[in-house]
Image (tube, rainbow, N blue to C red):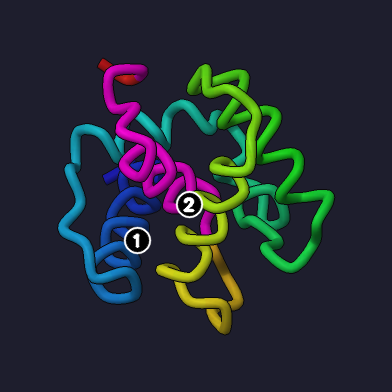
């Protein structure tokens, strides 16, 4: 099992145990691959949910550019809902898990089709 597969298994575990979701493993793998090399970097692999600038970056680079969503209050609401689901007290919010939940939240699975 390669490093990426180990990380995907860890992300699936977070989705099941911390977020109460049964992950679509195919979609999770595609989202993880889409994160690129950032998943291997300790700092870049997580989302600093308490930093407004970090949430803005996720909104601009992922929700708007990658998923093709229009900027509006619903993006912030969706992001907050995902952070809430992951658990505000959860220190390590993995980027791939947050992105996966955002894809599901906004019904944008087709982007990874």
Report the residue that reaches farthest toward the right.
53
Image mark count = 2
Q: Residue at x 76, y 50 (%)?
A: 54
Q: Which mark is residue 10?
A: 1
Q: Residue at x 30, y 33 (%)?
A: 107
**Of discs 1 and 2, which sits in the foreground?**
2
Q: Is residue 100 magenta?
A: yes
In the picture provided, is 56 more to the left or to the right than 22?
right
Which class describes the residues within 10 Å of circle 2: few (<14), some (14-19), or many (20+)?
Answer: many
In this view, the residue in front, 92 or 37, is 92
Span highlighted in magenta in the image: 94-111
Magenta: main secondary structure equals helix
In the rendered view of the protein, which quadrant contains the N terminus?
top left
The correct choice, above or below, for 44 with respect to 83 in the image is above
The correct choice, above or below, for 72 with respect to 66 in the image is below
Of labels 1 and 2, earlier in sequence is 1
**Real-space Cα separation, disc 1 to disc 2, in angstroms:** 13 Å
In this view, the residue in front, 79 or 22, is 79
In the picture of the structure, the residue carrying the numbered disc 2 is 98
Report the residue that reaches farthest toward the front.
73
Q: Residue at x 67, y 63 (%)?
A: 49
The correct choice, above or below, for 48 with respect to 25 in the image is below
* Kind of element beneath mark 1: helix
In the picture provided, is 23 more to the left or to the right than 63?
left
Q: Is residue 22 magenta?
A: no
Q: Position of residue 108 (x, y in %)?
A: 34, 27
């Amino acid at each position: 099992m390669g490093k990426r597969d180990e990380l995907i298994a860890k992300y699936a575990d977070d989705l099941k145990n911390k977020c109460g979701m049964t992950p679509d493993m195919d979609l999770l793998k595609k989202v993880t691959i889409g994160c690129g090399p950032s998943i291997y970097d300790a700092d870049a692999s997580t989302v600093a949910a308490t930093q407004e600038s970090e949430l803005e970056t996720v909104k601009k680079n992922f929700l708007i550019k990658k998923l093709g969503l229009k900027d509006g209050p619903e993006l912030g609401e969706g992001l907050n809902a995902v952070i809430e689901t992951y658990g505000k007290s959860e220190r390590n919010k993995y980027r791939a898990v947050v992105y996966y939940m955002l894809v599901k939240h906004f019904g944008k699975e087709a982007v990874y089709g």
